[in-house]
Image: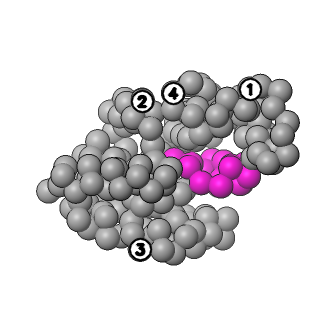
Amino acid sequence: MFNIEEFEIVKKRALENHIPIIMDDTLEVLKEVLAKENPKRILEIGTAVGYSASCFARFTENACIIDTIELDEERAKEAIENVKNIGVSDRINIMIGNAVDILPTLNDSYDIVFIDAAKSKYSIFLEEGIRLVKNKGVILADNVLYKGYVMSDYNKHKQRTAVRHLREYIKEVTENPNLETKILEVGDGLAITKVTK
């Protein structure tokens, strides 16, 4: 039974502690994607406190299983506690460790892959996502416009690496003939990629 009160507490706490979670307008788009795709398996790269994984559980049927990977052990422990309190721990499997190491060990096939982790690794996550997603499956990548820097001539040192990697990601998903991509200006930028194998 999905506990909406606990869900709202997790959201409120994340916002108060400046933990990045899916923005509301991005979530509206994700709800539409989930309704259209009706996924049975979702892979999430970047659990944080379990808010987005709980959103996926909320907006999909009970048969849908969500596997999610989190690098930060403390955050992962918090996520495990949160999804238990929300009442969706039977549908969410949280793996603790570096996604770069974990992804190559996975051999399940997913309907949707959601990327929301280290910006500098998006191209690696894309490669693994293409391998793991089903034919005609969808890869979603959050924060691809990164405060608007990615599409501007922004070149400050502090964010330069993240911006460069995100530009590479966008180039790959828009130029690869097997990928059909829409970039939406919701939240901090969302890339929706349909994969044809």
Residue 27: x and y in percent read 40, 36
Residue 36: x and y in percent read 36, 30
Asked if disc 2 and disc 4 are in contact, CB closer than 8 Å, the reply is yes
Magenta stretch secondary structure, dominant: helix
Which residue in the protein does label 2 denote?
A: 25
Which residue is found at the position 57% from the left and 73% from the top?
Answer: 97
Residue found farthest to the left = 1
Question: Is residue 22 in the magenta section?
Answer: no
> In the figure, residue 99 lies in which quadrant?
bottom right
Give the mark nearest the N terminus, 1 or 2. Answer: 2
Residue 172: x and y in percent read 75, 36
Give the mark nearest the N terminus, 3 or 1. Answer: 3
Q: Secondary structure at mark 4?
A: loop
Which residue in the protein does label 4 denote?
A: 186
Q: Measure the C-alpha gap from mark 2 to mark 4.
A: 6 Å
Amino acid at pointer 4: Val
Question: Is residue 123 in the magenta section?
Answer: yes
Estimate how packed mark 1 is, as few (under 14), some (14 to 19) or many (20 or more) residues with alpha carbons within 10 Å: few
Q: Secondary structure at mark 2?
A: helix
